[in-house]
Image (cartoon, grey):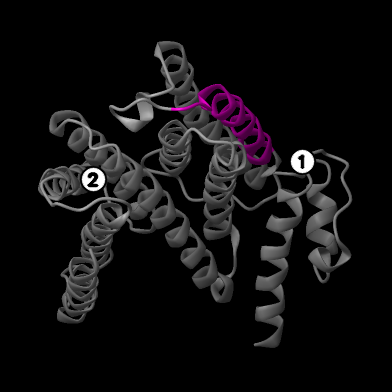
């Protein structure tokens, strides 16, 4: 039992060591390879830092977000907050950055899978590529945030959100694929936290801007659908079923945003309500995907937690 836990912890440390070593000959902590010298020696001939490219992608996107945050700094004069100091050039670069973040994340994921297979640890064949989902949402949220607040603090907050959103998503996926049984629960928890943090920041910023219903609700639906698609990574679903579940999640977030936009409240309360809606739909869909039928315990858990959260938000709004 002790040997099993040691092996699992060593697997986690290997992933962390690779995350902070973006170059092929970077030193690896001795603790990360204790009891794993044979496996590590065989992997040294391949591209050792399987997650290193994810760090590079995260850093590159964070730099662009920092540049756009500096470009957006200024005093607004009314209207939608995110367009007060930004123009067409800002949003063209922002859209390109979001797209490139998704492409870069997917490339880093594919590289990590190829490196793992080269050292005798092939990963299961993914039915649908979804490594792009959280990086795209996190980058979008960071850009919306810097455009909405357009102040000096966003020079640091925006890039940090983009960096940790992308890096945290890729690292948690890496751990879910490679960690032992005892470490899998920790990896699953990190994965869930990253997804929900990205959901809150992005959905909250969409609500803050009080965008027209057709645009704001559609954008929130796309964000919710993408994150549901990534949440279902842990379930063994056919591609068609997984996409159908994601569309269902998108529809729920679209409808929830339309309703919340009519609620006379401001600030991050609306974003918190949308987060609760996402938590409910993503949780129920995941429970349904992992089992043949949703248990009463699952419905009670998500129903009670969701109802209590919504009640607290309504009373404190």
Which quadrant of the figure has residue 78? top left
Residue extending furthest top? 89
Q: Provide residue 126's location: percent of width, then percent of height.
A: 42, 44
Q: Secondary structure at mark 2?
A: helix
Location of residue 35 (image quadrant): bottom right
Badge 2: residue crowd in 10 Å (few <14, some 14–19, many ≥20): many
Above or below: residue 93 compared with residue 299: above
- Mark 1 sits on what residue? 22
Q: Residue under circle 2?
A: 246
Q: Main secondary structure of the magenta part?
A: helix
Considering depth in this image, is 307 or 291 the residue closer to the camera?
307
The quadrant in which residue 175 appears is bottom right
Q: In the image, which residues are magenta?
A: 53-75
Q: Residue 103: percent from the left, percent from the top?
A: 50, 27
x and y percentages locating residue 243 in the rendered image: 23, 41
Q: Point out the tag, 2 or 1, that comes first from the N-terminus.
A: 1
Q: Helix or strand or loop: what does disc 1 sit on?
A: loop
Quadrant showing the C terminus = bottom left
Quarter of the rendering occupied by the N terminus:
bottom right
Seen in the image, is 35 located left or right of residue 167?
Answer: right
Give the percent coordinates (x, y) of residue 248.
Answer: 15, 47
Give the crowd class for mark 1: few <14, some 14-19, many >=20 residues within 10 Å. some
């Amino acid at each position: 039992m002790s040997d099993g836990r040691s092996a699992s912890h060593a697997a986690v440390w290997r992933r962390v060591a690779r995350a902070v070593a973006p170059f092929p000959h970077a030193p690896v902590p001795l603790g990360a390879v204790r009891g794993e010298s044979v496996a590590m020696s065989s992997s040294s001939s391949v591209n050792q830092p399987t997650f290193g490219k994810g760090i590079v992608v995260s850093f590159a996107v964070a730099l662009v977000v920092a540049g756009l945050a500096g470009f957006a700094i200024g005093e607004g004069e009314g209207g939608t907050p995110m367009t007060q100091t930004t123009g067409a050039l800002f949003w063209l670069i922002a859209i390109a950055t979001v797209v490139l973040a998704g492409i870069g994340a997917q490339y880093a994921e594919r590289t990590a899978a190829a490196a793992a297979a080269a050292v005798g640890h092939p990963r299961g064949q993914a039915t649908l590529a979804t490594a792009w989902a959280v990086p795209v949402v996190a980058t979008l949220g960071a850009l919306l945030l810097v455009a909405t607040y357009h102040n000096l603090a966003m020079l640091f907050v925006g890039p940090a959100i983009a960096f940790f959103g992308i890096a945290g998503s890729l690292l948690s996926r890496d751990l879910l694929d490679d960690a032992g049984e005892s470490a899998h629960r920790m990896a699953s928890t990190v994965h869930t936290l990253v997804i929900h943090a990205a959901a809150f920041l992005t959905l909250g910023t969409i609500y803050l801007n009080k965008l027209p219903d057709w645009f704001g609700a559609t954008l929130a639906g796309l964000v919710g659908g993408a994150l549901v698609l990534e949440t279902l990574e842990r379930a063994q679903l056919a591609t068609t079923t997984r996409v159908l579940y994601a569309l269902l999640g998108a529809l729920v977030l679209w409808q929830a945003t339309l309703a919340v936009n009519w609620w006379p409240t401001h600030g991050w309360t609306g974003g918190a309500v949308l987060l609760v809606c996402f938590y409910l739909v993503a949780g129920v869909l995941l429970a349904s995907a992992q089992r043949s039928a949703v248990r009463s315990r699952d419905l009670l858990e998500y129903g009670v937690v969701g109802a209590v959260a919504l009640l607290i938000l309504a009373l404190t709004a």
